[in-house]
Amino acid sequence: MLQVILAGHTLDRELVKALRAGELPADVEPTPETISAAYARISRYPEPIPELRAQARRDVAASRKSNRMIVFRMGHHSVAEHVTLNFDVLGVSRLALEALEDARLCSYTEKSQRYVTFGGEHVVPAEFDAAERELFGRTMGEQIAFYRSAFERLHELQRRRNPDQLRTKVGRETVEGWAKEDARYALGLATETQLGFSGNARNIEHVIRKLRHHPLAEVRALSQALFDAASEVAPSLIILSDPERFREAFGRDVSDAFVRRNRAAIDRLGRETMAGAPPAPAAEHPRHGDVTLVGGSAEPDVEVLAALLHTGSGRPWDDCRARARALDDEGRRRFVREALADLSEFDALPREFEHAWFTLEVVLSAACYGQLKRHRMMTFTAQPYDPALGLTVPEAMTEVGLEAELRALADRSAGTWERLAGRHPRAAEYALTNAHRRRTLVTLDLREVYHMARLRMDHHAQWDIRHVAGSITALARRVAPAAAALACGKDEFVGMCATGC
Ligand SMILES: Cc1cc2nc3c(=O)[nH]c(=O)nc-3n(C[C@H](O)[C@H](O)[C@H](O)COP(=O)(O)OP(=O)(O)OC[C@H]3O[C@@H](n4cnc5c(N)ncnc54)[C@H](O)[C@@H]3O)c2cc1C
Protein backbone atom coordinates (compact mmCIF):
# COMPACT_ATOMS: atom_id res chain seq x y z
CA MET A 1 0.00 0.00 0.00
CA LEU A 2 1.30 3.44 -0.95
CA GLN A 3 3.03 5.26 1.87
CA VAL A 4 5.06 8.47 1.82
CA ILE A 5 7.14 9.38 4.85
CA LEU A 6 9.10 12.60 5.21
CA ALA A 7 12.52 11.19 6.10
CA GLY A 8 14.56 14.34 6.40
CA HIS A 9 15.06 17.94 5.39
CA THR A 10 17.52 20.82 5.41
CA LEU A 11 17.93 22.46 8.79
CA ASP A 12 20.05 25.42 9.89
CA ARG A 13 23.12 24.06 11.68
CA GLU A 14 22.55 26.38 14.65
CA LEU A 15 19.10 24.84 15.12
CA VAL A 16 20.63 21.36 14.97
CA LYS A 17 23.18 22.34 17.64
CA ALA A 18 20.47 23.86 19.85
CA LEU A 19 18.28 20.76 19.45
CA ARG A 20 21.20 18.49 20.37
CA ALA A 21 21.99 20.54 23.45
CA GLY A 22 18.33 20.64 24.43
CA GLU A 23 18.53 24.44 24.24
CA LEU A 24 15.99 25.21 21.56
CA PRO A 25 13.58 27.84 22.93
CA ALA A 26 10.02 26.55 23.00
CA ASP A 27 8.82 29.30 20.64
CA VAL A 28 11.43 28.57 17.91
CA GLU A 29 10.23 26.19 15.24
CA PRO A 30 12.96 24.01 13.65
CA THR A 31 11.87 24.48 10.04
CA PRO A 32 13.96 24.34 6.84
CA GLU A 33 12.25 27.52 5.63
CA THR A 34 14.60 29.79 7.57
CA ILE A 35 17.48 28.83 5.27
CA SER A 36 15.64 29.87 2.09
CA ALA A 37 14.35 33.05 3.77
CA ALA A 38 17.86 34.01 4.92
CA TYR A 39 19.43 33.27 1.53
CA ALA A 40 16.68 35.23 -0.23
CA ARG A 41 17.65 38.27 1.86
CA ILE A 42 21.28 38.09 0.72
CA SER A 43 20.48 39.97 -2.47
CA ARG A 44 19.04 43.04 -0.66
CA TYR A 45 20.49 43.26 2.84
CA PRO A 46 24.05 44.23 3.78
CA GLU A 47 24.38 42.01 6.89
CA PRO A 48 26.71 39.00 6.75
CA ILE A 49 24.92 35.75 5.97
CA PRO A 50 25.22 34.23 9.49
CA GLU A 51 23.38 37.30 10.82
CA LEU A 52 20.65 36.95 8.18
CA ARG A 53 20.26 33.29 9.19
CA ALA A 54 20.01 34.27 12.86
CA GLN A 55 17.28 36.82 12.02
CA ALA A 56 15.38 34.23 10.00
CA ARG A 57 15.60 31.71 12.84
CA ARG A 58 14.37 34.23 15.41
CA ASP A 59 11.21 35.13 13.47
CA VAL A 60 9.82 32.13 11.59
CA ALA A 61 6.53 33.90 10.82
CA ALA A 62 8.44 36.71 9.06
CA SER A 63 10.59 34.11 7.25
CA ARG A 64 7.50 32.38 5.93
CA LYS A 65 5.98 35.68 4.86
CA SER A 66 9.14 36.67 3.00
CA ASN A 67 9.35 33.24 1.33
CA ARG A 68 5.79 33.62 0.06
CA MET A 69 6.53 37.14 -1.14
CA ILE A 70 9.89 36.46 -2.78
CA VAL A 71 9.30 32.98 -4.17
CA PHE A 72 5.76 33.30 -5.39
CA ARG A 73 4.80 36.97 -5.67
CA MET A 74 8.15 38.13 -7.07
CA GLY A 75 8.73 34.89 -8.97
CA HIS A 76 12.19 34.30 -7.52
CA HIS A 77 11.52 30.52 -7.39
CA SER A 78 15.18 29.51 -7.28
CA VAL A 79 15.31 30.58 -3.62
CA ALA A 80 13.25 27.48 -2.77
CA GLU A 81 16.09 25.34 -4.15
CA HIS A 82 18.08 25.91 -0.96
CA VAL A 83 15.76 23.57 0.93
CA THR A 84 16.09 19.82 0.32
CA LEU A 85 13.42 17.32 1.33
CA ASN A 86 13.84 13.54 1.53
CA PHE A 87 11.00 11.02 1.34
CA ASP A 88 10.65 7.28 1.87
CA VAL A 89 8.18 6.10 -0.77
CA LEU A 90 6.81 2.60 -0.14
CA GLY A 91 4.30 0.38 -1.89
CA VAL A 92 4.47 2.25 -5.19
CA SER A 93 4.06 0.46 -8.53
CA ARG A 94 6.71 0.42 -11.23
CA LEU A 95 4.24 2.16 -13.51
CA ALA A 96 3.63 5.04 -11.08
CA LEU A 97 7.37 5.33 -10.55
CA GLU A 98 7.79 6.12 -14.23
CA ALA A 99 5.68 9.24 -13.69
CA LEU A 100 7.61 10.27 -10.57
CA GLU A 101 11.05 9.70 -12.09
CA ASP A 102 10.17 11.90 -15.03
CA ALA A 103 11.33 14.81 -12.86
CA ARG A 104 14.83 15.40 -14.08
CA LEU A 105 16.31 17.44 -11.25
CA CYS A 106 15.41 15.10 -8.37
CA SER A 107 17.24 12.07 -6.95
CA TYR A 108 16.08 8.49 -6.65
CA THR A 109 17.36 5.19 -5.30
CA GLU A 110 15.01 2.29 -5.74
CA LYS A 111 14.80 -1.34 -4.78
CA SER A 112 16.65 -3.35 -7.39
CA GLN A 113 14.85 -6.21 -9.08
CA ARG A 114 18.31 -7.73 -9.34
CA TYR A 115 19.10 -7.91 -5.63
CA VAL A 116 15.70 -8.29 -3.99
CA THR A 117 13.34 -11.24 -4.43
CA PHE A 118 9.78 -10.16 -5.17
CA GLY A 119 7.02 -11.86 -3.21
CA GLY A 120 4.12 -10.89 -5.44
CA GLU A 121 3.18 -7.58 -3.80
CA HIS A 122 1.40 -5.48 -6.39
CA VAL A 123 -0.82 -2.46 -6.67
CA VAL A 124 -4.52 -3.05 -7.39
CA PRO A 125 -5.54 -0.01 -9.44
CA ALA A 126 -8.39 1.99 -7.91
CA GLU A 127 -9.81 2.46 -11.41
CA PHE A 128 -10.94 -1.19 -11.71
CA ASP A 129 -14.37 -2.47 -10.70
CA ALA A 130 -14.90 -5.86 -9.01
CA ALA A 131 -14.95 -7.91 -12.23
CA GLU A 132 -11.92 -6.09 -13.60
CA ARG A 133 -10.08 -6.65 -10.31
CA GLU A 134 -10.73 -10.35 -10.55
CA LEU A 135 -9.38 -10.53 -14.10
CA PHE A 136 -6.39 -8.41 -13.13
CA GLY A 137 -5.74 -10.49 -9.99
CA ARG A 138 -5.63 -13.71 -12.05
CA THR A 139 -3.04 -12.16 -14.37
CA MET A 140 -0.92 -10.98 -11.42
CA GLY A 141 -1.13 -14.49 -9.91
CA GLU A 142 0.12 -16.06 -13.13
CA GLN A 143 2.96 -13.56 -13.43
CA ILE A 144 4.28 -14.14 -9.93
CA ALA A 145 3.92 -17.94 -10.22
CA PHE A 146 5.95 -17.86 -13.44
CA TYR A 147 8.52 -15.53 -11.82
CA ARG A 148 9.06 -17.99 -8.96
CA SER A 149 9.42 -21.09 -11.10
CA ALA A 150 11.55 -19.30 -13.72
CA PHE A 151 13.83 -18.02 -10.96
CA GLU A 152 14.53 -21.62 -9.80
CA ARG A 153 15.42 -22.76 -13.33
CA LEU A 154 17.48 -19.66 -14.10
CA HIS A 155 19.32 -19.90 -10.78
CA GLU A 156 20.20 -23.51 -11.53
CA LEU A 157 21.52 -22.47 -14.97
CA GLN A 158 23.65 -19.65 -13.55
CA ARG A 159 25.05 -21.95 -10.86
CA ARG A 160 26.02 -24.51 -13.52
CA ARG A 161 27.56 -21.83 -15.70
CA ASN A 162 29.53 -20.09 -12.97
CA PRO A 163 30.91 -22.68 -10.54
CA ASP A 164 33.82 -20.42 -9.56
CA GLN A 165 31.46 -17.71 -8.33
CA LEU A 166 29.88 -20.11 -5.86
CA ARG A 167 32.97 -20.15 -3.66
CA THR A 168 32.28 -16.76 -2.08
CA LYS A 169 29.17 -15.16 -0.55
CA VAL A 170 29.44 -12.20 -2.94
CA GLY A 171 29.79 -14.57 -5.88
CA ARG A 172 26.73 -16.59 -4.80
CA GLU A 173 24.70 -13.39 -4.45
CA THR A 174 25.85 -12.25 -7.89
CA VAL A 175 24.76 -15.54 -9.45
CA GLU A 176 21.40 -15.31 -7.70
CA GLY A 177 21.09 -11.71 -8.90
CA TRP A 178 21.58 -12.76 -12.55
CA ALA A 179 18.73 -15.25 -12.16
CA LYS A 180 16.45 -12.65 -10.55
CA GLU A 181 17.15 -10.01 -13.16
CA ASP A 182 16.03 -12.41 -15.91
CA ALA A 183 13.06 -13.87 -14.01
CA ARG A 184 11.69 -10.33 -13.52
CA TYR A 185 10.83 -10.08 -17.24
CA ALA A 186 7.66 -11.97 -16.21
CA LEU A 187 6.72 -9.44 -13.55
CA GLY A 188 4.10 -6.80 -14.26
CA LEU A 189 4.23 -3.03 -14.09
CA ALA A 190 1.88 -3.24 -11.08
CA THR A 191 4.72 -4.77 -9.02
CA GLU A 192 5.28 -2.78 -5.86
CA THR A 193 8.63 -1.30 -5.04
CA GLN A 194 10.13 1.25 -2.66
CA LEU A 195 12.53 4.13 -3.12
CA GLY A 196 14.31 7.01 -1.48
CA PHE A 197 13.27 10.24 -3.22
CA SER A 198 14.95 13.60 -2.65
CA GLY A 199 14.66 16.98 -4.22
CA ASN A 200 14.69 20.65 -3.46
CA ALA A 201 11.45 22.39 -2.52
CA ARG A 202 11.10 24.02 -5.94
CA ASN A 203 11.30 20.66 -7.72
CA ILE A 204 9.12 18.88 -5.19
CA GLU A 205 6.46 21.53 -5.79
CA HIS A 206 6.81 20.98 -9.55
CA VAL A 207 6.44 17.19 -9.10
CA ILE A 208 3.38 17.54 -6.87
CA ARG A 209 1.72 19.92 -9.31
CA LYS A 210 2.47 17.79 -12.36
CA LEU A 211 1.36 14.51 -10.77
CA ARG A 212 -1.79 16.00 -9.25
CA HIS A 213 -3.62 15.71 -12.59
CA HIS A 214 -2.06 12.46 -13.82
CA PRO A 215 -4.46 9.97 -15.45
CA LEU A 216 -3.52 7.20 -12.95
CA ALA A 217 -5.30 7.35 -9.56
CA GLU A 218 -2.20 5.93 -7.86
CA VAL A 219 -0.05 8.78 -9.18
CA ARG A 220 -2.59 11.35 -8.02
CA ALA A 221 -2.52 9.73 -4.55
CA LEU A 222 1.28 9.91 -4.61
CA SER A 223 1.06 13.61 -5.41
CA GLN A 224 -1.33 14.18 -2.48
CA ALA A 225 0.89 12.22 -0.08
CA LEU A 226 3.98 14.19 -1.16
CA PHE A 227 2.04 17.41 -0.77
CA ASP A 228 0.87 16.49 2.74
CA ALA A 229 4.40 15.55 3.84
CA ALA A 230 6.13 18.54 2.22
CA SER A 231 3.65 21.21 3.18
CA GLU A 232 3.73 20.13 6.81
CA VAL A 233 7.39 21.05 7.08
CA ALA A 234 7.78 23.81 4.48
CA PRO A 235 4.34 25.41 4.01
CA SER A 236 5.72 28.70 2.73
CA LEU A 237 7.53 26.92 -0.14
CA ILE A 238 4.69 24.64 -1.26
CA ILE A 239 1.94 26.94 -2.48
CA LEU A 240 1.54 26.60 -6.24
CA SER A 241 0.39 23.00 -5.80
CA ASP A 242 -2.33 24.02 -3.35
CA PRO A 243 -5.01 26.12 -5.08
CA GLU A 244 -6.64 26.97 -1.73
CA ARG A 245 -3.46 28.17 -0.04
CA PHE A 246 -2.55 30.11 -3.16
CA ARG A 247 -5.94 31.82 -3.14
CA GLU A 248 -5.58 32.60 0.57
CA ALA A 249 -2.11 34.06 0.10
CA PHE A 250 -2.69 36.02 -3.10
CA GLY A 251 -6.41 36.61 -3.40
CA ARG A 252 -6.62 35.00 -6.83
CA ASP A 253 -6.58 31.54 -8.41
CA VAL A 254 -3.51 29.76 -9.68
CA SER A 255 -4.26 28.36 -13.12
CA ASP A 256 -3.86 24.60 -13.25
CA ALA A 257 -5.40 24.35 -16.70
CA PHE A 258 -2.16 23.60 -18.49
CA VAL A 259 -1.06 20.76 -16.19
CA ARG A 260 -4.63 19.46 -15.91
CA ARG A 261 -5.66 19.38 -19.54
CA ASN A 262 -2.73 19.92 -21.77
CA ARG A 263 -1.10 16.47 -21.79
CA ALA A 264 -4.39 14.91 -22.86
CA ALA A 265 -4.89 17.67 -25.44
CA ILE A 266 -1.45 17.05 -26.95
CA ASP A 267 -2.13 13.29 -27.08
CA ARG A 268 -5.50 13.85 -28.75
CA LEU A 269 -3.97 16.29 -31.23
CA GLY A 270 -1.31 13.70 -32.06
CA ARG A 271 -3.87 10.94 -32.63
CA GLU A 272 -6.15 13.12 -34.73
CA THR A 273 -3.39 14.60 -36.87
CA MET A 274 -1.82 11.21 -37.53
CA ALA A 275 -5.13 9.43 -38.20
CA GLY A 276 -5.02 8.07 -41.74
CA ALA A 277 -1.54 9.48 -42.42
CA PRO A 278 0.18 7.03 -44.78
CA PRO A 279 3.44 5.43 -43.60
CA ALA A 280 6.43 7.52 -44.74
CA PRO A 281 8.74 5.94 -47.32
CA ALA A 282 11.50 4.01 -45.53
CA ALA A 283 14.23 6.51 -44.64
CA GLU A 284 17.90 5.64 -44.67
CA HIS A 285 18.47 6.32 -40.99
CA PRO A 286 21.53 4.71 -39.43
CA ARG A 287 20.40 1.82 -37.22
CA HIS A 288 21.97 -0.42 -34.63
CA GLY A 289 19.92 -3.09 -32.84
CA ASP A 290 16.66 -1.48 -31.71
CA VAL A 291 18.08 2.05 -31.91
CA THR A 292 17.68 4.33 -34.93
CA LEU A 293 19.47 7.65 -35.30
CA VAL A 294 16.71 9.96 -36.58
CA GLY A 295 18.32 13.37 -36.13
CA GLY A 296 21.09 15.41 -34.61
CA SER A 297 24.02 17.71 -35.33
CA ALA A 298 24.89 17.82 -39.01
CA GLU A 299 28.64 17.43 -38.37
CA PRO A 300 29.09 16.37 -34.74
CA ASP A 301 32.87 15.99 -34.95
CA VAL A 302 33.19 19.48 -36.38
CA GLU A 303 30.83 20.97 -33.76
CA VAL A 304 32.84 19.54 -30.86
CA LEU A 305 36.24 20.43 -32.29
CA ALA A 306 35.10 23.92 -33.23
CA ALA A 307 33.68 24.42 -29.69
CA LEU A 308 37.01 23.32 -28.16
CA LEU A 309 38.87 25.72 -30.48
CA HIS A 310 36.39 28.47 -29.67
CA THR A 311 36.95 28.33 -25.89
CA GLY A 312 40.71 28.32 -26.16
CA SER A 313 41.44 30.60 -29.11
CA GLY A 314 39.36 33.72 -28.50
CA ARG A 315 38.41 33.62 -32.20
CA PRO A 316 34.84 33.86 -33.57
CA TRP A 317 32.79 30.68 -34.18
CA ASP A 318 33.00 30.77 -37.99
CA ASP A 319 36.83 30.84 -37.90
CA CYS A 320 36.91 27.91 -35.47
CA ARG A 321 34.39 25.92 -37.49
CA ALA A 322 36.34 26.47 -40.71
CA ARG A 323 39.55 25.30 -39.00
CA ALA A 324 37.85 22.21 -37.52
CA ARG A 325 36.46 21.40 -40.95
CA ALA A 326 39.85 21.71 -42.57
CA LEU A 327 41.33 19.00 -40.32
CA ASP A 328 41.34 15.50 -41.84
CA ASP A 329 40.04 12.45 -39.93
CA GLU A 330 43.41 11.65 -38.41
CA GLY A 331 43.94 15.30 -37.42
CA ARG A 332 40.53 15.34 -35.68
CA ARG A 333 41.24 12.11 -33.80
CA ARG A 334 44.62 13.38 -32.67
CA PHE A 335 43.05 16.63 -31.48
CA VAL A 336 40.40 14.80 -29.43
CA ARG A 337 42.99 12.39 -27.96
CA GLU A 338 45.11 15.35 -26.87
CA ALA A 339 42.12 17.24 -25.48
CA LEU A 340 41.15 14.19 -23.38
CA ALA A 341 44.70 13.04 -22.59
CA ASP A 342 44.37 12.99 -18.79
CA LEU A 343 40.76 11.90 -18.63
CA SER A 344 40.07 9.16 -16.09
CA GLU A 345 36.90 7.11 -15.90
CA PHE A 346 35.74 9.34 -13.01
CA ASP A 347 36.08 12.69 -14.81
CA ALA A 348 33.27 14.50 -16.59
CA LEU A 349 34.05 15.44 -20.18
CA PRO A 350 34.54 19.11 -21.07
CA ARG A 351 31.27 20.96 -21.66
CA GLU A 352 32.22 21.51 -25.30
CA PHE A 353 31.12 17.92 -25.99
CA GLU A 354 27.55 19.06 -25.34
CA HIS A 355 27.53 20.94 -28.65
CA ALA A 356 27.12 17.66 -30.56
CA TRP A 357 23.70 16.06 -30.08
CA PHE A 358 21.76 13.07 -31.32
CA THR A 359 18.06 12.19 -31.53
CA LEU A 360 17.32 8.48 -31.43
CA GLU A 361 14.22 6.36 -31.65
CA VAL A 362 14.67 3.50 -29.21
CA VAL A 363 12.34 0.52 -28.94
CA LEU A 364 12.96 -1.02 -25.55
CA SER A 365 11.50 -3.27 -22.88
CA ALA A 366 9.87 -1.97 -19.71
CA ALA A 367 12.83 -3.45 -17.79
CA CYS A 368 15.26 -1.43 -19.90
CA TYR A 369 13.12 1.72 -19.89
CA GLY A 370 13.21 1.64 -16.08
CA GLN A 371 17.00 1.95 -16.28
CA LEU A 372 17.53 4.28 -19.26
CA LYS A 373 15.10 6.92 -17.94
CA ARG A 374 17.30 7.32 -14.86
CA HIS A 375 19.82 9.21 -17.03
CA ARG A 376 18.44 12.59 -16.16
CA MET A 377 20.45 14.73 -18.55
CA MET A 378 18.76 13.16 -21.59
CA THR A 379 15.55 14.42 -23.10
CA PHE A 380 13.23 11.47 -22.97
CA THR A 381 9.67 11.09 -24.30
CA ALA A 382 7.81 7.82 -24.59
CA GLN A 383 4.76 6.30 -26.25
CA PRO A 384 2.55 3.99 -24.17
CA TYR A 385 3.61 0.33 -23.96
CA ASP A 386 2.50 -1.51 -27.09
CA PRO A 387 2.32 -5.33 -27.20
CA ALA A 388 2.46 -5.07 -31.02
CA LEU A 389 6.14 -4.11 -30.66
CA GLY A 390 6.91 -7.66 -29.50
CA LEU A 391 8.82 -8.80 -26.45
CA THR A 392 12.34 -8.69 -25.09
CA VAL A 393 13.19 -12.24 -24.00
CA PRO A 394 16.33 -12.89 -21.91
CA GLU A 395 18.68 -15.36 -23.61
CA ALA A 396 18.91 -17.37 -20.41
CA MET A 397 15.12 -17.79 -20.44
CA THR A 398 15.43 -19.42 -23.88
CA GLU A 399 18.31 -21.56 -22.67
CA VAL A 400 16.29 -23.02 -19.80
CA GLY A 401 13.46 -23.79 -22.21
CA LEU A 402 11.03 -21.16 -20.88
CA GLU A 403 10.84 -18.80 -23.84
CA ALA A 404 7.57 -20.20 -25.17
CA GLU A 405 6.01 -20.10 -21.69
CA LEU A 406 7.15 -16.50 -21.15
CA ARG A 407 5.68 -15.54 -24.53
CA ALA A 408 2.40 -17.27 -23.66
CA LEU A 409 2.28 -15.49 -20.28
CA ALA A 410 3.01 -12.14 -21.94
CA ASP A 411 0.27 -12.80 -24.51
CA ARG A 412 -2.25 -13.55 -21.76
CA SER A 413 -1.15 -10.40 -19.91
CA ALA A 414 -1.62 -8.45 -23.14
CA GLY A 415 -5.09 -10.02 -23.44
CA THR A 416 -5.93 -8.64 -19.99
CA TRP A 417 -4.49 -5.26 -21.02
CA GLU A 418 -6.70 -5.26 -24.13
CA ARG A 419 -9.84 -6.08 -22.14
CA LEU A 420 -9.13 -3.34 -19.61
CA ALA A 421 -7.91 -0.74 -22.09
CA GLY A 422 -11.39 0.10 -23.43
CA ARG A 423 -12.44 1.66 -20.12
CA HIS A 424 -8.99 2.42 -18.72
CA PRO A 425 -6.48 3.16 -21.49
CA ARG A 426 -3.70 4.08 -19.04
CA ALA A 427 -4.45 1.86 -16.04
CA ALA A 428 -4.60 -1.20 -18.33
CA GLU A 429 -0.79 -0.93 -18.62
CA TYR A 430 -0.49 -2.25 -15.05
CA ALA A 431 -1.19 -5.71 -16.52
CA LEU A 432 1.79 -5.66 -18.91
CA THR A 433 5.15 -7.24 -18.07
CA ASN A 434 8.74 -6.07 -17.99
CA ALA A 435 9.22 -7.90 -21.31
CA HIS A 436 6.69 -5.69 -23.12
CA ARG A 437 8.06 -2.83 -25.16
CA ARG A 438 7.49 0.79 -26.05
CA ARG A 439 8.84 3.30 -28.54
CA THR A 440 10.77 6.25 -27.08
CA LEU A 441 12.43 9.33 -28.47
CA VAL A 442 15.72 10.27 -26.84
CA THR A 443 17.81 13.37 -27.43
CA LEU A 444 21.18 13.51 -25.77
CA ASP A 445 24.48 15.25 -26.24
CA LEU A 446 27.85 13.60 -26.67
CA ARG A 447 28.90 14.35 -23.09
CA GLU A 448 25.94 12.31 -21.83
CA VAL A 449 26.67 9.55 -24.37
CA TYR A 450 30.10 9.20 -22.74
CA HIS A 451 28.59 9.14 -19.25
CA MET A 452 25.92 6.61 -20.14
CA ALA A 453 28.44 4.40 -21.96
CA ARG A 454 30.75 4.37 -18.95
CA LEU A 455 28.03 3.13 -16.62
CA ARG A 456 25.87 1.08 -18.91
CA MET A 457 28.40 -0.59 -21.24
CA ASP A 458 30.42 -1.73 -18.25
CA HIS A 459 30.21 -5.46 -17.46
CA HIS A 460 28.38 -4.69 -14.17
CA ALA A 461 25.44 -3.28 -16.11
CA GLN A 462 22.41 -5.44 -16.89
CA TRP A 463 22.47 -7.01 -20.39
CA ASP A 464 19.35 -5.30 -21.77
CA ILE A 465 20.55 -1.77 -21.08
CA ARG A 466 24.09 -2.79 -22.07
CA HIS A 467 22.72 -3.63 -25.55
CA VAL A 468 20.83 -0.34 -25.84
CA ALA A 469 23.76 1.74 -24.51
CA GLY A 470 26.07 -0.16 -26.90
CA SER A 471 23.79 0.66 -29.84
CA ILE A 472 23.54 4.36 -28.91
CA THR A 473 27.32 4.55 -28.59
CA ALA A 474 27.91 2.66 -31.84
CA LEU A 475 25.67 5.14 -33.70
CA ALA A 476 27.38 8.13 -32.07
CA ARG A 477 30.76 6.70 -33.12
CA ARG A 478 29.49 6.16 -36.66
CA VAL A 479 28.65 9.85 -37.15
CA ALA A 480 31.29 11.30 -34.80
CA PRO A 481 34.27 8.95 -35.27
CA ALA A 482 36.76 11.36 -33.69
CA ALA A 483 34.79 12.99 -30.88
CA ALA A 484 33.02 9.77 -29.77
CA ALA A 485 36.07 7.52 -30.14
CA LEU A 486 36.68 7.15 -26.39
CA ALA A 487 33.07 6.44 -25.40
CA CYS A 488 33.01 2.99 -23.78
CA GLY A 489 32.29 1.12 -20.55
CA LYS A 490 34.37 1.87 -17.42
CA ASP A 491 36.00 -1.55 -17.66
CA GLU A 492 37.22 -0.94 -21.22
CA PHE A 493 38.34 2.61 -20.55
CA VAL A 494 41.94 2.08 -19.42
CA GLY A 495 42.79 -0.24 -22.34
CA MET A 496 41.09 2.08 -24.79
CA CYS A 497 43.14 5.07 -23.66
CA ALA A 498 46.35 3.05 -23.76
CA THR A 499 45.78 2.06 -27.38
CA GLY A 500 44.70 5.62 -28.24
CA CYS A 501 41.21 4.49 -29.34
C1 LIG B 1 25.41 -1.39 -12.35
C2 LIG B 1 24.36 -0.44 -11.94
C3 LIG B 1 23.47 -0.78 -10.92
C4 LIG B 1 22.49 0.13 -10.51
N1 LIG B 1 21.62 -0.23 -9.52
C5 LIG B 1 20.67 0.63 -9.08
C6 LIG B 1 19.79 0.29 -8.00
O1 LIG B 1 19.86 -0.78 -7.44
N2 LIG B 1 18.87 1.20 -7.62
C7 LIG B 1 18.78 2.42 -8.23
O2 LIG B 1 17.94 3.22 -7.86
N3 LIG B 1 19.59 2.78 -9.25
C8 LIG B 1 20.53 1.92 -9.70
N4 LIG B 1 21.37 2.28 -10.74
C9 LIG B 1 21.16 3.59 -11.41
C10 LIG B 1 22.17 4.64 -10.95
O3 LIG B 1 22.09 4.81 -9.57
C11 LIG B 1 21.95 5.99 -11.66
O4 LIG B 1 20.73 6.55 -11.28
C12 LIG B 1 21.94 5.89 -13.15
O5 LIG B 1 23.00 5.10 -13.60
C13 LIG B 1 22.03 7.30 -13.78
O6 LIG B 1 23.35 7.77 -13.70
P1 LIG B 1 23.81 9.11 -13.00
O7 LIG B 1 23.00 9.34 -11.79
O8 LIG B 1 25.30 9.06 -12.82
O9 LIG B 1 23.62 10.26 -13.98
P2 LIG B 1 22.68 10.98 -15.01
O10 LIG B 1 21.32 11.15 -14.47
O11 LIG B 1 22.87 10.34 -16.34
O12 LIG B 1 23.37 12.40 -15.03
C14 LIG B 1 24.68 12.61 -15.56
C15 LIG B 1 25.54 13.31 -14.53
O13 LIG B 1 24.94 14.56 -14.21
C16 LIG B 1 25.14 14.84 -12.82
N5 LIG B 1 23.83 14.91 -12.17
C17 LIG B 1 22.63 14.70 -12.72
N6 LIG B 1 21.66 14.96 -11.85
C18 LIG B 1 22.24 15.32 -10.71
C19 LIG B 1 21.76 15.74 -9.43
N7 LIG B 1 20.44 15.83 -9.16
N8 LIG B 1 22.66 16.05 -8.48
C20 LIG B 1 23.99 15.98 -8.72
N9 LIG B 1 24.50 15.62 -9.92
C21 LIG B 1 23.64 15.30 -10.90
C22 LIG B 1 26.01 13.74 -12.26
O14 LIG B 1 27.35 14.13 -12.38
C23 LIG B 1 25.72 12.60 -13.20
O15 LIG B 1 26.74 11.66 -13.21
C24 LIG B 1 22.36 1.40 -11.15
C25 LIG B 1 23.25 1.73 -12.18
C26 LIG B 1 24.24 0.85 -12.57
C27 LIG B 1 25.16 1.24 -13.68
Image (cartoon, rainbow, N blue to C red):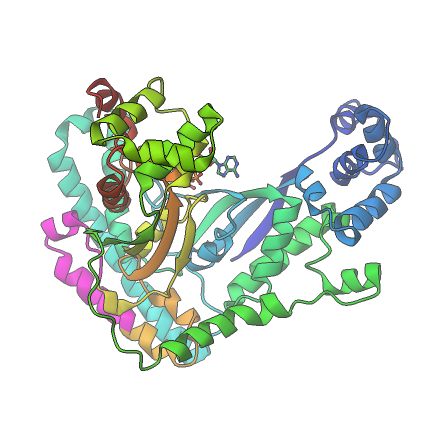
What residue is at 25 percent from the left and 54 percent from the top?
Answer: 292
Most foreground residue, 303 or 139: 303
Q: Inspect the magenta stretch and tell me whether residue 392 lies in it.
A: yes
The quadrant in which the C terminus is found is top left
- Relative depth, front residue between 284 and 255: 284
The number of numbered discs placed on residues in the rendered structure image is 0
Q: Residue 228: percent from the left, percent from the top?
A: 68, 55
Q: Is residue 29 left or right of residue 461?
A: right
Vertical comparison of 486 with 293: above or below: above
**Magenta segment main secondary structure:** helix
As drawn, is 16 to the left or to the right of 425? right
Q: Which residues are magenta?
A: 391-414
Q: Position of residue 160 (x, y in %)?
A: 11, 36
Residue 86 seen? no
From the viewer's perspective, tell me whether residue 58 is left or right of residue 102.
right
Residue 382 drawn above or below residue 453: below
> Would you identify the image quadrant in which residue 170 lies?
top left
Q: Quadrant of ligand 1?
A: top left
Foreground pick, 177 / 167? 177
Q: Which residue is painted at 21% across and 62% down in the image?
A: 283
